[in-house]
Image: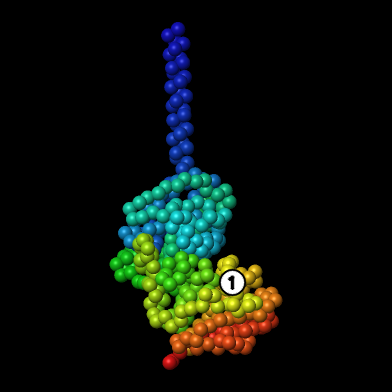
Amino acid sequence: MALKYSTALIFCFALLLHSALLAQDEDKKITSIEIKAIPGLQFDKVRFSVAPGAEVKLTVTNSDDDMPHNMVITKPGSRADVVLAAQQLAEKGPEMNFIPKSPLVLWSIPVIYSGESKTIQFKAPEEPGIYPFVCTYPGHGFIMYGYMYVTENGIMPALENDENIPPLRRTGDKKVQDTESAAMHHHPKLHPYDNVPPYLYRVFIEESSLASIAVHLPNQLSYCWDAALCQLQFAWQGEFLDNTDLWHGHKNAYAKVLGEIFYREKMEFPIRIGSRESIPSPEFLRYKLIDGYPEFHYLLSGVEVHEIIHPNKEGTGLIRTIKVNNAKEPVWFLFNADEQVEYGFNKGEIENGALKLSPDEGKEFTIRMTKSNK
């Protein structure tokens, strides 16, 4: 009897030992990746490699004293689309950790503040490829990114030849990276990276709703377009914006205009279809970029309108091109006599202080708004 009990105990012990060894083997199969968000809007690692189908344990730590960050891993080729979708979250951004609900998003780590770490575990895609990871916190996504290489052999291109990663990081000289990071951290610019106009930010800005889009144009001109109201709110001449408070995550922060505002919209809504007295309830649809310039699409009285804004060559005003598709009634543009702005129109007639266009003329017309010298 004692022998039977001993045999049973030995058998149980063997099973437990076997299970423990299996668990250790499973742990060994997990690929652990640790990444830090560092000053200068950078990840300390801009790429890593995992095998197809591997179990991945990813830990992100925010080592940036100034700014919050998140991380979103996307499908191949989808980084820019996800960054744009995050910008379009507007006032919903903070509660969603600036992570859009999109099939392009594979995994994500929510916003983490200085000194915080968060970990996620996932199974890498079976399909080999190059999968972007990016911080979609406002203003960060166009420079703060890297790539997860899913590859059988773990081979990645030489760092200096890797066109997927940010240009600043295509060097094997860590001293250069550290020096540039320190310089950006201790001598911050109003914008953490260089942009060539035109470019835009989704921002919180005074005198406009939480769904505001600020656009910086060539020739030192800028404007704010309100996606909630579907209209141009104001325009200015000079530098663009100081987003420092926004990017630092300060509560109730607003972007600051750096320049002289020369135009403010005073009409409840300037474009009207049918009766000039009928104030429409606009519905924002989307915007798309044409050569870098946003073209806004929205509905007025069930009619789709497209609007794109360019600078004039002199840098003294804006040229608005408006397309009203399939209007069956006259199109009106109401404007108030403003001593700061002079108007010019390529079509239509002025009637009692408003521009009136036939449905055919309304298919495409331009409005020139020039800063007055008065």
Query: Does residue 292 appear in this view?
Result: no
Count of numbered tags = 1
Q: Residues within 10 Å of mark 1 (few under 14, many from 20)?
A: some
Q: Residue furthest left?
A: 186
For the C terminus, the image quarter is bottom left
Q: For the point 52% across and 67% down, which residue is it?
A: 228
Image position of 313 with respect to 297: above or below: below
Image position of 326 with respect to 117: above or below: below
98 or 128, which is in the foreground?
Answer: 98
Residue 207 location, quadrant: bottom left
Q: How far across and how far down the image is residue 130, in percent?
A: 53, 57
Q: Residue furthest top?
A: 1
208 or 176, which is in the foreground?
Answer: 208
Image position of 207 with respect to 358: above or below: above
Q: How far across and how far down the image is residue 354, in percent?
A: 57, 84
State the colouring used for the structure image. Answer: rainbow
120 or 19, which is in the foreground?
Answer: 120
Q: How far across and how far down the image is residue 159, in percent?
A: 45, 62
Query: Can you identify the residue that label 1 sits on?
Result: 280
Q: For the point 45% across and 7% down, which residue is it?
A: 1
Q: How far across and how far down the image is residue 219, in percent?
A: 46, 83
Q: For the point 33% across and 55% down, which residue is it?
A: 114
Query: Does residue 105 appear in this view?
Result: yes
Q: Amino acid at mark 1?
A: Pro
SS assignment at label 1: loop
367 or 151, which is in the foreground?
Answer: 367
Q: Residue furthest front?
A: 277
